[in-house]
Amino acid sequence: MSEGVYDLFKKGSELLERGDFMAASIPLERARSLDPDKGSIREALGRAYFRSARFEQAAEEFAALVERYPVNDYAHFCLGRSLEKTGRRLEARRHAVLAAGMRPDRADYRALRDRLRAA
């Protein structure tokens, strides 16, 4: 019996919350293939990739989110962090500045912005 998108997302999210990042990517990838426009799936998959040090893949997921939801501050922040980890600091800086501008109350956003500006 094949699992539906929601069941796959739920399973992946539970694995992600338990810290099993590599395993979480499997059902989340399947969910994305069934519903590639669902932002919550792309975000969870990006987080799973990031936490398992698959930074290029994380950047791809967060870039897809930013493209679809350009005012999603968290997506810009995560894209900035992912790009920083791949060595693409100039690109990362742009997204960090945008995230911090959208949510100046977030210290983590400001810290990423400031770290990338200093580099």
Image (cartoon, rainbow, N blue to C red):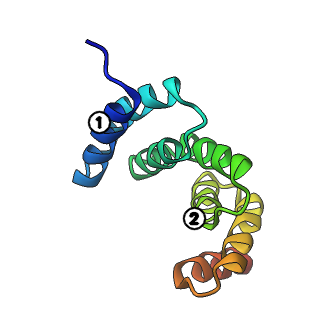
Vertical placement of 15 versus 104: above or below? Answer: above
10 Å crowding of disc 2: few (<14), some (14-19), many (20+): many
Question: What residue is shown with label 2?
Answer: 74
Eyeballing the image, is 60 above or below 1? below
Looking at the rendered structure, the kind of residue marked 2 is: Tyr
* Res. 23 mark: 1
Residue 106 marker:
none
Instruction: Tell me if label 1 and label 2 are in contact, CB under 8 Å.
Output: no
Image: 17 above or below 42:
below
Pick whichever of labels 1 and 2 is earlier in the sequence.
1
Query: Residue at the location (67% across, 47% down)?
Result: 63
Crowding near the residue tagged with mark 1, few <14, some 14–19, many ≥20 C-alpha atoms within 10 Å: some
Q: Position of residue 47 (x, y in %)?
A: 45, 51
State whether residue 23 appears in this view. yes
Depth order, front residue of 17/81: 17
Q: Amino acid at mark 1?
A: Ala
Determine the CA span between mark 1 and mark 2. Answer: 23 Å
What residue is at 59 percent from the left and 77 percent from the top? 109
Seen at 35% across and 30% down, the residue is 27
Mark 1 or 2: in front is 2
